[in-house]
Structures are given as structure tokens and as C-alpha cells.
Image (cartoon, rainbow, N blue to C red):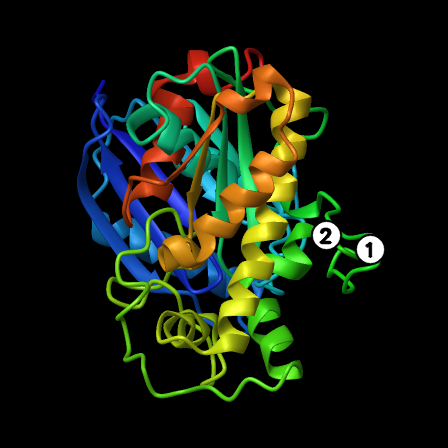
Amino acid sequence: MSDLTLAVDIGGTKFAAGLVEPDGQVVAAERVATPQGADAETLWGTLTALLDRLDVPAALAGVGIGCGGPMTWPEGEVSPLNMGGWRGFPLRARLAARFPGVPVRIHNDAICLAVAEHWRGAGRGSAAMLGMVVSTGVGGGLILGGRLIDGGTGNAGHIGHVVVDPEGPPCGCGGNGCLEAIARGPGLAAWALAQGWSPGDAVTEGDLYRDAPGDPHRDAPGELYREEGTATARRLAADAAAGDPIALAAMARAGRALGIAIASAVNLCDLDLVTVGGGLSQAGDLLFRPLEEALREHTRMGFAGRVRVVPAALGQDAGLVGAAALVIAGGDYWSPGL
């Protein structure tokens, strides 16, 4: 039996697979662009071809999978919003059939990123942590008592749908004023355009979001946060850094929404740490300063004031590391019997 774990990271712009050692080191990895508009079997064929390229050993410790949702959990029938070809696709069962006799475990991609940060990143040693991703969407994973909290359907920690403004913009979930509706990159750029923002020329490809840690929407290395057109959150953040008043207001709006949502999580769960990754987090103080201001306004109880908010520490392999942890460190990140 090999001590290597096969990790699979499924996203709307790329598939990744890697072999991970027991200490979390990724020793080999392959990536391929996600075929756009593909049907179920074409997507599956793309994944199996990727695994063939990786030269997976015959004996494995197990298989860990991170995939965008929604999904039935722990069954692992996936219906990623950005992959229309997979609707109720039995991803866990398919991989279990390909790799019989070893544990095959799956979770939401944002949860895997939170697990990675807790296991080998900025959250090491924290007993009560929320790991967040702020990118083309907003997601998260919750660690309490040093263990991943799944919730009733595997969706605990889904902070993107905490309501921060009941009168706010419509969200893709059908509600209004969710954190994701305000702070996700494309929504942020759309708000700025509605206020009269005219995208400048200050940013070049890859400047701001190069090697963005913890971004589940990342593409191949060097294209880790891909948006179409010129009115993007990447350009918005660059314009804010150059002093554009509308861009600055947009970043402050996103940061404030994040701070309010994090305060609610802190007050509810008594957190000591929040990690924030994803493309938008690379805006630095433009985002984190208003975040901290709103957070401190809404965490007035003594226990809540101790929370720290820090950038995620892991790079482009974070999704693979978190998926592998479902197997390697299953005592902390996987529920017995599943």
C-alpha cells in the first residue's frame, strides 16, 4: 500500500489532480482546462485522461475530491453551477469504481480550501476557525474544536449566503442582500459600473491576482482569477489603488459586507481566527481595512474581540492539499462512517 493520496480538484475553469504525501506535500500535479459546454461523459473523459497523465500508482492510501456544488453529501452526486453537463453526476461513485479498495471522500471545494488552511496553512493550531474564499463567489468552511463541521447536509460554513443587507441586491440563490451578492468580484464590478466607474488602464494581466491563494475559480498558473472583459474586479482593485473614488467606494462596500458577515459568524461560533483567500483578497488593505472596521463595530462582546482575520497562506495547490486531507487527516476532517 502506497502512502500517497490522490487528490482531485474540480472547478469551472480547470480540473487538477495531484499525488500528496502524508505531510501534505504535493509531489506531482497535472491540470487541464475544463471543457466548456461539455456533456457528462466528455467531462468524465477529461478527468480520466488527466489521471492517466498523472501516472497514478496502483496502490494508494485513498482518494480525496474537492468539487463545486451543489452536491448531495456524502454521496458525492455533483451538480456544479458552472458545469451544466454534470447534474446529479455520481463523481464519488465513479472514482470509487476506478480506485477500488481504498477510501474515496468528497467535499465542497471551498470547504477543502478551508481544510487546507487549517491543516497546513494560516490556520494551523486554531481550534475555532472559519476559512473563507472571496472570488467569483464567496464560500467557506468551519472548524470548531479542531474538527471540520459538516452540518446536516455538508454545507456548514457557507458564509456567502449570510444576509448582510436585507434591502440589498438580488443573489443567485434567490434571496436579497447575501454577502456573495455584494462581495463577489463580478457583482462588485457591476455595482461600480452602475455608480459611473470607467475602468482605467492601470492593471495588466496577472498583476494583482497572480498566485492568488485559496481561489477555487483559479485557472492554470498565471491565470488564477479569470474574468471576461475589462470591467473586472481585478481592474477595479487596481483603479482603487490608483485613487479612483468609485473604485475605492466599491472596495470599501465589499470590505464592510465581509466584516459584518464575519462578525455574525464570530458571535455565533466563538471563533479565534478567520482566513480569507481567493482572488479578491489580493486587494490587501483596500479590502481588509474596511473589513476590520466593520468587524470591530459588530464584535463588542469580550470573547468576540479576540478574533484575528488573516490572508490565506497557501497557493495554487490549496485545493489539492485540502482534498487530500479528507483522507490523510480524516480524524479531523471526515465524519466516521461516511
Residue 156 visible within the image? no
Residue at 63 percent of width and 20 percent of height? 269
Position of residue 91 in the picture relative to residue 153 (left or right): left
For residue 124, which numbered disc appears in the image? none
SS at mark 2 in the image: loop
Q: Is residue 324 above or below residue 2?
A: below
Where residue 65 sits in the image (x, y, percent)? 44, 38
Residue 219 visible within the image? yes
Residue at 58 percent of width and 12 percent of height? 337
Residue labelled with disc 1:
175
Type of amino acid under label 1: Gly
> In this orientation, which residue lies closer to the viewer: 179 or 97?
179
Where residue 237 sits in the image (x, y, percent)? 42, 69
Label 1 Cα crowd, 10 Å radius (few <14 / some 14-19 / many 20+): some
Q: CA distance from mark 2 to mark 1?
A: 7 Å
Position of residue 170 in the picture relative to residue 312 (left or right): right
Q: Quadrant of residue 15?
A: bottom left
Q: Quadrant of residue 46?
A: bottom left
Q: Quadrant of the N terminus?
A: top left
> In this orientation, which residue lies closer to the viewer: 153 or 141?
141
Residue at 32 percent of width and 31 percent of height? 122
Residue labelled with disc 2:
178
> In this orientation, which residue lies closer to the viewer: 101 or 138?
138
Q: Are marks 2 and 1 in contact (CB under 8 Å)?
A: yes
Q: Quadrant of the C terminus?
A: top right
SS at mark 1 in the image: loop
Q: Is residue 156 above or below residue 242?
A: above
Position of residue 171 in the picture relative to residue 206 (left or right): right
Q: Quadrant of residue 62?
A: top left
